Image (spheres, rainbow, N blue to C red):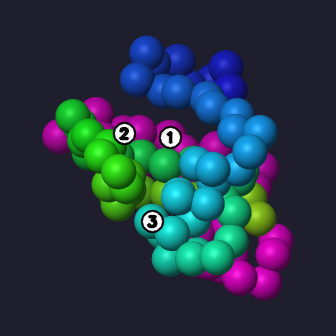
Amino acid sequence: MRFLDDVRIKHFYDNNKTVGKIIADSVGWAGNVAWDIYLFYRPFAEWTETPPKPLYWMHQLTDGWATKDKYRTGGDLKNELFISMEKLLSN
């Protein structure tokens, strides 16, 4: 994602879906795999055996188990990403 340029932003691909399963658990999707998901954590949040709960998050999944109120695509996704980033940077 070129439009979000910050050293704190990380892109990660998990071929074995290990992290995707752990992230799914952290957002209430136990038993599923999270991907195409955007997570914003409080500054200096540390991951231990389980990740912290994200402050803001959204996804692009159409699966029935995925949270509908967090679904964003296109311009809505771009706007929500910027809003979430601004909220984090203003604190």
Question: Quadrant location of residue 8?
Answer: top left
Q: Label 2 to label 3, Cα distance in Å?
A: 23 Å
Cα gap from disc 1 to disc 3, whole angstroms: 23 Å
- Find the magenta span and give its range: 62-91
List x then y, in percent, for residue 86. Answer: 36, 39
Whole-number angstrom distance, CA of label 1 to CA of label 2: 6 Å
Q: Are marks 1 and 2 in contact (CB under 8 Å)?
A: yes
Answer left or right for 21 relative to 6: right
The numbered mark at residue 26 is: 3
> Could you tell me the amino acid type at mark 1?
Phe
Rendering coords of residue 14 (x, y %): 69, 39
Residue displayed at 43% across by 15% down: 7
- Say which amino acid is labelled 2: Glu
**Residue denoted by label 2:** 86
Residue at the spot 81% in from the left edge and 75% down from the top edge: 63
Q: Nearer the viewer, residue 10 or 72?
A: 10
Disc 1 marks which residue? 82
Which secondary structure, mark 3?
helix
Query: What is the total number of numbered labels drawn onto the structure image?
Result: 3
Q: Nearer the viewer, residue 22 or 66?
A: 22
- Residue 63 on the magenta segment: yes
Query: Which mark lies nearer to you, 1 or 3?
Result: 3
Q: Quadrant of residue 30?
A: bottom right
